[in-house]
Image (cartoon, rainbow, N blue to C red):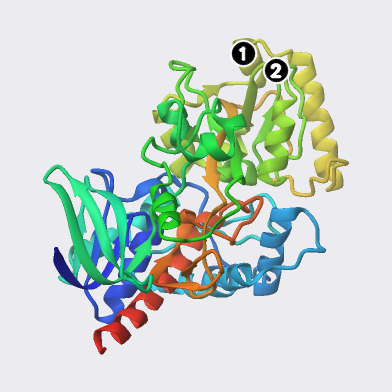
Amino acid sequence: MSNFPGVIVIGSGLSGSSAAMAVVESGLPVMIIEKEKRLGGNSVKAWAGYNGCCTSTQRTKGVKDSVELFAADTAFSAFKTHNVPANELQKTLAGNSGPGHAWLENYGIKLPVLSQNGGHSAPRTHRPTKGGAGSYITNSLLRKLKKNDKCQIITKTSFTKLLTDLSGRVTGVEYESADGKTSVNALAVVLASGGFAGCVARKGADGLLAKYRPDLVDLPTSNPPSATGDGMIIAEAIGARLMDMEYVQVHPTGFIDPNNPEEKELTLATEALRGHGALLINQKGRRFVNECWHRDWVSEAEKTQHGSIYIVMNSGVAKDCAVPFVKQYTGLGLLAHFESGRAFCSKYNVPYDNFCDTLKVYNKLAKRGYSPCGKDRFENAPFYPEDKYVVGIVTPLLHYVMGGVEINRNAECLNKSRQPIPGLFGAGETTGGVHRKNRLAGNSLVDCVVFGRIAGASASKYAKARSRL
């Protein structure tokens, strides 16, 4: 058994890389253990952006927002009632979102594009001018960590066990690679190993998804097969409390690849498309839902439809989302371009007269500024049949796990008595309590940054105290 005089972080996604950077900032060494060959985890597949309030970008654009409003939106997304106030974790998320944005900017990670996604009371979803937000932020941090002498990164290595002493304090980890099993003592451990929505990519025959939500195992997923919730299982084995495990988010828009319609691991059609005005049209050529509603509501509405569901962008939406979304999705063969609405309808056997009638009604609602379905934002309206269109076929898919290891506002992992487990910290999708029943669109990346930084700082403080004993 070897000794590591610092903090071990399990997982190299945005929560893990944020935690590792916080450890480095404290002056301690950090070791990142990654299951896959590729770094970045599921974070590099996140598109929508980083939610932040009271940021420099909002101030520049004259956007009025507040910590209280952001926290309230997060709480309402979970339970769909204003009678359940924001909890401590949600307040911590909102309160640290602006400083997290400034922290990223300090590392040269700029997010100048601002949009308002479903469930938000103000434009607060930040993204870069090029590339997906998740890959841009995560890879930017990882590039800096790779160059830092205090950071050691191990890939293609499976985390298998948490080491503890007789008092229950976490003292290190066991991991397995091609060279066999290795045990390493460390001053503290941060769990940032992700969720379990990737189980279906390996047929969902076993694992946490089948245990907690067997009704969902037949859905496709945006997650890789490696997202199996290992950290949750291993933490529970030493007494950690798991919470909200049944709350698995079904995202309403995953692209169906026309060339491989039975594929289980799909590419997400980012929320930003609908945030900029894209419509959801059913096989009959009708709208059937407020496209800017919360994800769970939109997904439920989709389940009632028969035939294909299309995400439809006019030239205005397509221009706003050209870089990186439309360009990249088109390159993947997931979007088709049409010279007119008639051409789109002809291609997919959608009744053209119904489509024209739908647009006519929608344009009247947009002019009025409100729809009976609750929609009050009509970006890039009006829609005309004669315009050019960009269209993809979408379906609900597994996207995110709200539950996990319970943590407190200091990112300490809690045991079944809700007391901190000494030496164990957590962040990101491995943990529960932040999002509760439903995650607000765009809250994954900010969760990773905020609680990743807190976990890294808390683990470093704990580690320094232990090293002095």
Q: Is residue 84 visible?
A: yes
Label 2 sits on residue: 283
Query: Whole-percent x and y of residue 72?
Result: 71, 66
Q: Residues within 10 Å of mark 1 (few under 14, many from 20)?
A: few
Which residue reaches farthest front?
A: 166
Q: How many marks?
A: 2
Q: Which part of the image, by quadrant, shows the C terminus?
A: bottom left
What residue lies at 65% left-to-right and 24% top-to-bottom?
309
Observer-side mark, 2 or 1, equals 2
Quadrant of residue 110 within the rendered picture: bottom left
| Helix, strand or loop for disc 2 | loop
Tell me residue 188's x, y (percent).
Answer: 31, 72
**In this rendering, is residue 295 above or below 391?**
below
- Residue at point 35% right, 80% down? 462
Residue beneath label 1, please? 348
For residue 399, above or below residue 19: above
Residue 16 in percent (x, y) is at 36, 60
Q: Nearer the viewer, residue 40 or 320?
A: 40
The label number, if any, that marks residue 245 in the structure image:
none
Q: In the shown orientation, is residue 329 left or right of residue 39?
A: right
